[in-house]
Image (cartoon, rainbow, N blue to C red):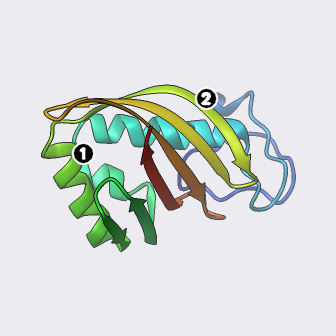
Amino acid sequence: MSKPGQPFAESASAPASGDDAAATRRGAMDPTHEHLRCVADALIAATNAFAVEQVLGLFAHDAVIDDPSTGQLFDGHAGIRRYVEQYFVGYQTVTRFLSMQRIGPQRARVRVDFTGDFGHEIGNLDISVDAQGLIAQLDADLE
């Protein structure tokens, strides 16, 4: 399994470490299901820890978060920082992974449970990654 931020191999190759022993990669710009899950898990862990810099490290510098529930689009690291600080740190949001479905070669829909100062919500995070395995776009939507 490749870790967030590691480029994808152009062909199947041996994993880089013992932790990655079961993973294979299927082609350039085609992350495995396991890599997408790793990205989702890393994002959830970082937001739950309110670790803003760690969250930013998961995103490409020109990434975008689109969250209609906020009425805003968050561009680049400055926008993503604002989003995390306001909606995760500010509301003490805790996210719990529920399920994940692959919806494209570089895209997954992650169903999550949010709790915080606002109450409780169920939502989807559609995560798209770039060739380096970083989040290029995140579309957030509440059910």
Query: Which of these two is toward me, 3 or 33?
Result: 33
Query: Residue at the location (26% across, 58% down)?
Result: 83
**Looking at the image, which residue sits at the far front?**
143
Q: Amino acid at mark 2?
A: Asp
Q: Is residue 61 visible?
A: no
Among numbered discs 1 and 2, the one appearing first in the sequence: 2
Circle 2 residues within 10 Å: few <14, some 14–19, many ≥20 = few
Q: Nearer the viewer, mark 1 or mark 2?
A: 1
User: Residue 93, position in %: x, y?
Assistant: 23, 36
Number of marks: 2
User: Residue 80, position in %: x, y?
Assistant: 31, 63
In this picture, residue 111 sits left or right of residue 27: left
Query: Residue at the location (32% across, 50% down)?
Result: 54
**Above or below, 8 relative to 119:** below
Query: Residue at the location (17% across, 54% down)?
Result: 86
Element marked by disc 1 = loop
Query: Which of these two is toward me, 73 or 76?
Result: 73
Quadrant of the snapshot with the C terminus: top left
In this picture, residue 86 sits left or right of residue 3: left
Q: Amino acid at mark 1?
A: Ala
Q: Tell me the residue that label 1 is attached to.
A: 51
Element marked by disc 2 = helix
Circle 1 residues within 10 Å: few <14, some 14–19, many ≥20 = some
User: Residue 32, position in %: x, y?
Assistant: 73, 43
Check if mark 1's residue and mark 2's residue have beta carbons within 8 Å.
no
Q: Tell me the residue that label 2 is attached to.
A: 19
User: Residue 98, position in %: x, y?
Assistant: 50, 24
Query: Residue at the location (21% across, 63% down)?
Result: 82
Residue 123 picture quarter? top left
Q: Is residue 29 visible?
A: yes
Residue 115 picture quarter? top left
